[in-house]
């Protein structure tokens, strides 16, 4: 298997709190290749930002990675020291935060902040950094960049500030850009412009992007792959087309019903009922079982395994196992070997002719979807 630019494997991250251990990320895996765009989607509290911060190792003091690995070009960076991680941030991987006003320092000019970011990660002198700052502002479509560098964040509009944040993140030409809800604070028109800009820059600079969002509709067109998160787990992953037209997890279906789309103009938007999961007290089985109207007994007791439901599409929902039972029977009827049937579906037929699901034979699945 060829080496991925970034490979997150079975990542676990928790926070120690007075009320107990908050399990924010619970076994997340995915791969990202150079020049590709991955979307991470989920409701508030599903663990999207904590996943991103774990990759960058910028967790709050009470947080730590408790398991798994984050491989960058084949090296597990969770084992790297502070110095190595400082080099990774900015140069290999940059992040744009949700609210530019909290990320930009109000007491320094835009130019100061951009130049500082550039000088921190490159050998450029002050004059070269200044020239690069103006070049970056031009690249991200900030008008009159020579004037803007002398301005303070409060003098710029929300859209302009977000462009400055993008310029700052891209100043060192990272291989990976993580955009954590980069447009949530903006109005719809500006939001569209910023997303268009990110797509343009991604093509021009060839970097890989991780787009973090709670709004599936916003990022669908730009993602090569989407992962849907709930309760700190990936519940579904696949191409945007597969996720939109063949959702195979009840949570994803709920998310889709809750977003506006041109095809569903006449339908009512339905928010997902129930309260988000309590991460201090995770259910033994499917994280979504307390809110799912199709939950079965097995859902309460066992975590569903990730199953391939189509070529570029995997989902972790017990309902897919029922569909797989049908497939197993069809395969057996077509003369396929018991081993092949079991490998493809996880279902086996005992000597008495009865079919049983054998969860040990789970498909390898996961990060290569
Ligand atoms: N420092 C912390 N201490 C305790 N719990 C935390 C801490 N940081 C995050 N969490 C918890 O981790 C869970 C996941 O948070 P995260 O910020 O990743 O959610 P998210 O998916 O990014 O949501 P949003 O869409 O609101 O940004 C939440 O329940 C959150 O309360
Ligand atoms: S595994 Fe069960 S509870 Fe979870 S989404 Fe599927 S049907 Fe619902
Ligand atoms: Mg977040």
Image (cartoon, rainbow, N blue to C red):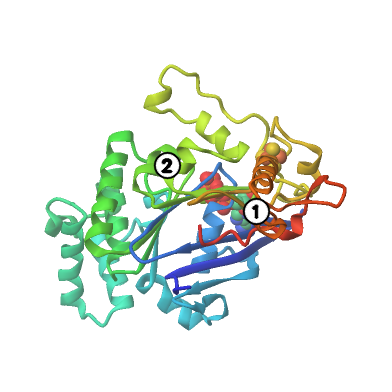
Nearer to me, 179 or 68: 68
Q: How crowded is mark 1: few (under 14 residues within 10 Å), some or many (20 or more)?
A: few
Q: Is tag 1's residue or tag 2's residue first in the polypeptide sequence?
A: 2
* 281 vs 265: above or below: below
The answer to the question of whether label 1 and label 2 lie on touching residues, with beta carbons closer than 8 A, is: no
**294 left or right of 34 in image:** right
* 297 vs 307: above or below: above
Ligand 2 rendered quadrant = top right
Spatial distance from mark 1 to mark 2, Cα to Cα? 30 Å
Q: Which residue is drawn at 75% across and 60% down?
A: 360
- Location of residue 187 in the rendering, given as x and y in whole percent from the top left corner: 33, 35
Q: In the current view of this chain or complex, which residue is farthest to the right? A: 352
Q: Residue at x 68, y 57 (%)?
A: 337
Nearer to me, 82 or 103: 82
Q: Residue at x 43, y 16 (%)?
A: 266
**245 left or right of 317 in image:** left
Nearer to me, 165 or 216: 216
- Location of residue 285 in the rendering, given as x and y in whole percent from the top left corner: 76, 47
Check residue 241 in the rendering and tell me which mark sits there, or answer none.
2
Is residue 243 visible in the rendered structure shown here?
yes
Q: What element carries label 2?
A: helix
Q: In which quarter of the image is residue 152?
A: bottom left
Check residue 336 in the rendering and tell me which mark sits there, or answer none.
1
**223 left or right of 357 in image:** left
Q: Residue at x 50, y 68 (%)?
A: 7
- Location of residue 170 in the rendering, given as x and y in whole percent from the top left corner: 29, 64
């Amino acid at each position: 298997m060829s080496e991925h630019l970034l490979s997150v494997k079975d990542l676990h991250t928790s926070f120690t709190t007075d009320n107990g251990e908050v399990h924010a990320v619970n076994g997340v895996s995915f791969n990202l290749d150079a020049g590709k765009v991955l979307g991470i989607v989920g409701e508030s509290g599903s663990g999207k930002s904590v996943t991103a911060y774990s990759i960058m190792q910028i967790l709050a003091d009470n947080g730590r990675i408790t398991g798994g690995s984050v491989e960058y070009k084949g090296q597990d960076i969770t084992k790297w020291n502070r110095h190595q991680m400082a080099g990774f941030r900015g140069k290999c991987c940059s992040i744009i935060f949700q609210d530019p006003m909290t990320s930009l320092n109000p007491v320094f000019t835009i130019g100061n902040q951009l130049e500082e970011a550039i000088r921190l990660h490159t050998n450029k002198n002050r004059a070269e950094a200044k020239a690069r700052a103006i070049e970056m502002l031009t690249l991200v479509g900030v008008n009159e960049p020579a004037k803007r560098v002398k301005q303070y964040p409060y003098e710029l509009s929300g859209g302009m500030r977000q462009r400055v944040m993008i310029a700052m993140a891209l100043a060192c030409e990272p291989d990976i850009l993580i955009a954590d809800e980069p447009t949530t604070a903006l109005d719809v028109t500006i939001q569209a412009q910023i997303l268009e800009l990110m797509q343009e820059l991604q093509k021009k600079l060839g970097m890989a992007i991780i787009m973090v969002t709670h709004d599936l509709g916003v990022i669908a067109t730009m993602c090569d792959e989407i992962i849907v998160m709930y309760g700190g787990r990936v519940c579904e992953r696949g191409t945007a087309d597969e996720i939109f037209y063949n959702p195979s997890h009840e949570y994803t279906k709920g998310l889709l019903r809750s977003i506006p789309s041109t095809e569903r103009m006449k339908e009512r938007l339905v928010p997902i009922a129930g309260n988000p999961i309590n991460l201090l007290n995770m259910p033994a089985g499917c994280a979504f079982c307390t809110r799912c109207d199709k939950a079965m007994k097995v859902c309460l007791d066992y975590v569903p395994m990730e199953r391939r439901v189509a070529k570029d599409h995997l989902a972790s929902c017990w309902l897919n196992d029922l569909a797989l039972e049908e497939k197993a029977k069809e395969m057996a009827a077509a003369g396929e070997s018991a081993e092949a049937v079991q490998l493809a579906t996880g279902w086996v037929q005992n000597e008495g002719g009865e079919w049983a699901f054998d969860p040990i034979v789970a498909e390898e699945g996961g990060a290569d979807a």
